[in-house]
Amino acid sequence: MNIVLYQPEIPPNTGNIARTCACTGASLHLIRPLGFSTDEKSLRRAGLDYWDMLDVHYYDSFEELEEKYPDHNFYFATKFATKFHTEIKYKEDDFLVFGKETAGLPDVITEHYSENCIRIPMIGDARSLNLANSVCVVLYESLRQLEFRDLT
């Protein structure tokens, strides 16, 4: 699986997500600008000693990522989607895209890919889950569907 963070802002979130990716074999794709340096102590501390196990890629735009993987499925997590993340039949090389902590994904992306937008169920008054928690929820659902292949 592939996790995409669109312009992440909070180092500990990205560090925790990096650790989750390392532990599950998922690749991490970061779209700039980042709200931090990947050399920051807090980012590395959250990822602990898993950085050498991480497959991480950097892009200057979402379009750059799209162009590199034109034949892959992309799913976009947003609280405005009508489809639950559990309604998708995930494939091994799909991309799960998450927006920045303060603003989510840009409308231009979610409108263009409206059929591929997914959401995690929450009570109506809740604004959002933490980004690292959201990634875990969706990633582990996709891995469950794939019968936790290559995981013990």
Image: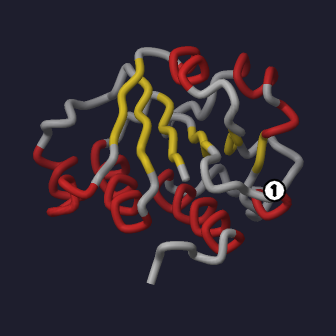
Q: Please determine whether, in this image, residue 82 is positioned above or below residue 6.
A: below
Of residues 67 and 86, the one nearer the viewer is 67
| Coloring scheme used | secondary structure
Q: Residues within 10 Å of mark 1 (few under 14, many from 20)?
A: some
The image quarter containing residue 24 is bottom left
In terms of image quadrants, where is residue 84?
Answer: bottom right
Q: Position of residue 27 (x, y in %)?
A: 43, 48
- Residue labelled with disc 1: 88
User: How far from the left and from the top, in percent, is residue 36?
Assistant: 25, 31
Height in image: 57 above or below 18? above
At numbered mark 1, what does the secondary structure look like: helix, strand or loop?
loop
Residue 116 point in image, percent of width and height = 80, 39
Amino acid identity at mark 1? Ile
- Report the residue at 49% width, 16% height from top: 61
Q: Nearer the viewer, residue 90 or 108?
A: 90
Who's the residue at 43% across and 37% down the image? 29
Residue 23 location (% of width, % of height):
36, 67
Hey, which quadrant is residue 48 in on the image? bottom left
Q: Is residue 140 left or right of residue 86?
A: left
- Residue at image point 61% right, 43% down: 95
Q: Return the residue nearer the eye: 113 or 123.
A: 113
7 over 120 or under it: above or below: above
**Viewer-side residue, 41 vs 59:** 59
> Which residue is painted at 66% across and 68% down in the image?
141
Q: Quadrant of the C terminus?
A: bottom left
On screen, residue 128 versus residue 86, left or right, reads: left
Q: How many marks?
A: 1
In the displayed image of the protein, which residue is found farthest to the bottom?
152
